[in-house]
Image: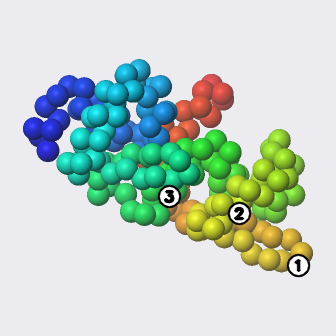
């Protein structure tokens, strides 16, 4: 591993992924301001040499330091990196059991957009729903894990949110 990170550019990319787990390729490209071919080459080399792992989801490649995250954590990081999903998750952490109606009152999502995100996160196991009468009440499946990830990676996951508040 040491030999692989002797190149300053490769070490820079590795440390960036370490600080920003679950970051997708295009986001990394913009943030690091590197030529596409150069970034792609070094990422592929680190994946091939098992320093990083690459997860393909919905057409996006997300990168993680190898053996740092389990499947559930990787999945959670993927949702937490997306603004709409993250907003819903944060809301449900503060308002467990909220209904879609309550969520819609808080955000400017359309009903179909909210439904799409809730279903995706429920299918993935990120959220769980309980039926109470005719209403579905939503909960974060593993709030402790999500809170730990938010605390550990708050600077990269919540930086936009914190910038708006400051």
Say which of marks 1 and 3 sits in front. 3
Say above or below: 38 vs 51. Answer: above
Q: Are marks 1 and 3 in contact (CB under 8 Å)?
A: no
Residue under pointer 3: 75
Using the image as rendered, state which of residue 88 and residue 29 is in the foreground: 29
Measured as percent of width and height from the top left, residue 55 is found at: 42, 53
Which residue sits at x=58%, y=65%? 124
Query: Is residue 1 shown left or right of residue 42?
Result: left
**Residue 94 at least partly seen:** no
Q: Which image quarter: residue 83? A: top right
Q: Pick whichever of labels 2 and 1 is earlier in the sequence.
A: 2
| Label whose residue precedes the other's in the sequence (3 or 2) | 3
Dot 2: what SS? helix
| Residue that appears at 34% across and 28% down | 37
Residue, disc 2: 119
SS at mark 3? helix
Quadrant location of the N terminus? top left
Within 10 Å of disc 1 (Cα), the crowding (few <14, some 14-19, many 20+) is few
Quarter holding the C terminus is top right
Q: Which residue is mark 1?
A: 133
Q: Is residue 138 left or right of residue 18?
A: right
**How is the protein colored in the picture?**
rainbow
Q: CA distance from mark 3 to mark 2?
A: 15 Å
- Point 55% across, 44% down: residue: 81
Residue 109, quarter of the rendered image: top right
Asked if disc 3 and disc 2 are in contact, CB closer than 8 Å, the reply is no
């Amino acid at each position: 591993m040491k030999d692989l990170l002797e190149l300053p550019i490769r070490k820079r990319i590795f440390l960036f992924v370490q600080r920003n787990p679950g970051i997708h390729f295009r986001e990394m490209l913009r943030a690091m301001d590197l030529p596409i071919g150069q970034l792609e080459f070094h990422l592929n080399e680190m994946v091939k040499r098992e320093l990083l792992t690459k997860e393909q989801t919905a057409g996006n490649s997300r990168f993680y330091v190898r053996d740092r995250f389990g499947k559930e954590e990787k999945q959670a990081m993927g949702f937490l990196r997306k603004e709409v999903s993250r907003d819903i998750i944060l809301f449900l952490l503060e308002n467990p059991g909220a209904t879609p109606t309550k969520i819609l009152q808080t955000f400017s999502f359309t009903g179909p957009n909210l439904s799409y995100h809730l279903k995706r996160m429920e299918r993935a196991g990120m959220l769980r729903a309980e039926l109470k009468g005719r209403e579905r009440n939503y909960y974060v499946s593993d709030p402790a894990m999500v809170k730990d990830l938010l605390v550990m990676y708050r600077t990269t996951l919540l930086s936009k949110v914190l910038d708006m508040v400051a």
